[in-house]
Amino acid sequence: MKSNFKRILLLLLFLVFTVSGLYASDGNTIDTGATAWMLTSTALVLLMVPGLAMFYGGLVRSKNVLGTIMHSFVAMGIISVLWVVVGYAMSFGSNILGGLFGWNNDYFFLKGIDTNILDAGIPEYVFSMFQGKFAIITPALIAGAFAERVSFKAYCIFIALWSLLVYNPLCHWVWASDGFLFNIGAKGAIDFAGGTVVHISAGVSGLVAALYLGSRRGYPYQVIRPNNLVITMLGAGLLWVGWFGFNAGSSVSSGLSTAQALTATQVAAAAAALTWIIIESIHQGKATALGFASGILAGLVAVTPAAGVVQPYGAMILGIIASLLCYMAIQLKNRLNYDDSLDAFGIHGVGGIAGAIFLVFFIRKSWMEEAASLAGGTWTIWNQLSVQILAVAVAISFAAIMTFLIIFSLDRIIKFKSSESEEMAGLDRSYHGERGYGMLNPS
Amino acid sequence: MKLITAIIREVQLDKVREALIAAEITRITVSCVSGHGRQRIEEMYRGQRIIPDLIPKIKIEIAVNDSFVDITVDTILKSAKTNGIEGHVGDGKIFITPLEECIRIRTGERGSSAI
């Protein structure tokens, strides 16, 4: 009898302590399943950054391999710090300046979210870090457009400014609960994991930067050959793996919508990669490894905005459309002779636009019904199409104008483009004083 | 027939190759080599400055008929030199050696027409 009483007392004590531990200031409970998956997703999205470094690093000449890899790595440093200081506040605070971006004093240095637990059941730290990874990879994507020809110092300043002036406002408009694109139409503009915020903005900014800075020395007449397609392929593989965090993590839960996004991601990437090598086989006679990798990326980019709302057949078609359009875009680039070195626009810009617009034809029924009831009657795919086009147009024009202004003013203060001798010596030697490989033959 | 071997700076490769092509000398072999000269360059790893014993250089080999020797040498001299007329220690060297025979593998041609 006595021991039973003791046992109950212990149990009660245990419950009191654990429950009080689980409750935070705002009364939400931690959903350990969702938190575990969001922690994993955060790590997966971070893994995409070295993945991107390898993908881009392999595509440049051997004298630029470290400089190009550093473009991605330094973003992990600069943007992580900025994100904690002001980025999260600007992106996910409440509207200020008429909704231009957000602000919340608690998010400044993340000082006020130490014990916050979101309604989704995850600590706010996890959500903040997860979103921070998106902020890191986006400016790193732009670097592909002006690879092999920019000063390291100017690049660092550029991505810091770009993150503050382009990424944070755009992120606020599309994903913050009071952002204007989040609330437009019946159920907002659909951008599940960053088609407009990440890929369209990076792709368009890259195009603007590439056009402004001009081409590399000797382009297109001199052969500019990838130094190591093996690391490019490994990078593409890491990107694919990391993308499960990027898309499935964007459900900010661990449940049905996570599974839907994960499936759509896999299907789109596979369909797009196959499409790319089939087009290539017909057009050029050979299926290339780089073509397969480009197809993977095109598919992943296109399904990014759509992963939450399309079923597998829709994801498959999106992947196919993305590969077709991106392939054509790159062919067109070669005709027009502008130097988007690693096709940041050709893949991320075009793929992102294709995904954000064509997704409307494959939205699952339940989403449309919900939108219709929110709109108070009917909501057709054509209504949603106009919302999507508006969101894409906003992303394109905002990114293009702001990037031009940033580069134009930055270029007045510090020379953005490498000098001819720096470019000839290579980024590795000119800016880092190192070399990537030992006695590799020049390429 | 002569074999012209030029050892140049890595960073000058683009310039030299472009100049050679402009002078219509297009049949060249390029390789990465390293060696001792009078030049010392620093590399930096985790803050430690290192002067490699063997400095990486580019070797260009060109087999030419006698009438092309001068133009080839002049072109390399002009394009491989850094710092204007002065030049810098480490700009490299050119070696010219007599070439006994040249044979085109495809046709079996020999002598100056095979170059």
Image (cartoon, rainbow, N blue to C red):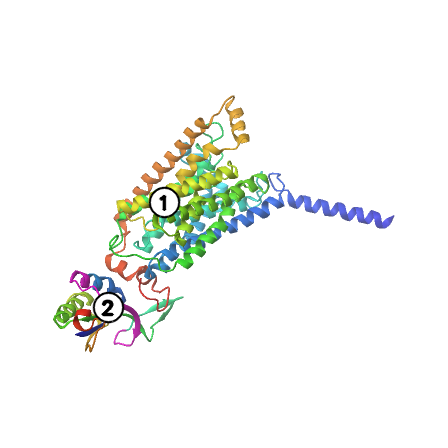
On the image, the x and y values in percent for residue A148 come to 31, 55
Can you say which quadrant of the picture contains the N terminus of chain B?
bottom left
Q: Which amino acid does label 2 sit on?
A: Thr
Dot in front, 1 or 2: 2
Q: Are marks 1 and 2 on the same chain?
A: no
User: Counting other residues with Cα less than 10 Å from the Cα at mark 2, is it few (<14), some (14-19), or many (20 or more)?
Assistant: few
Q: Which chain carries label 2?
A: B
State the image coordinates of residue A73 (x, y, percent, origin top left): 42, 55
Write down the residue under mark 2. B107
Q: Is residue B58 magenta?
A: no
- Residue A155 in the figure: left or right of residue B108: right
Residue shown at 48% from the left, 25% from the top = A379
State which region is magenta.
Answer: B19-39
Place of residue B69 in the rendered image (x, y in percent of width and height, measured from the top left): 14, 71
- Badge number at residue A8: none
Vertical arrangement, residue A426 with respect to residue B53, above or below: above
Report the quarter where the C terminus of chain B lies.
bottom left
Q: Name the residue under label 1.
A: A327
Q: Do the numbered discs 1 and 2 sit on residues whose CB atoms are within 8 Å?
A: no
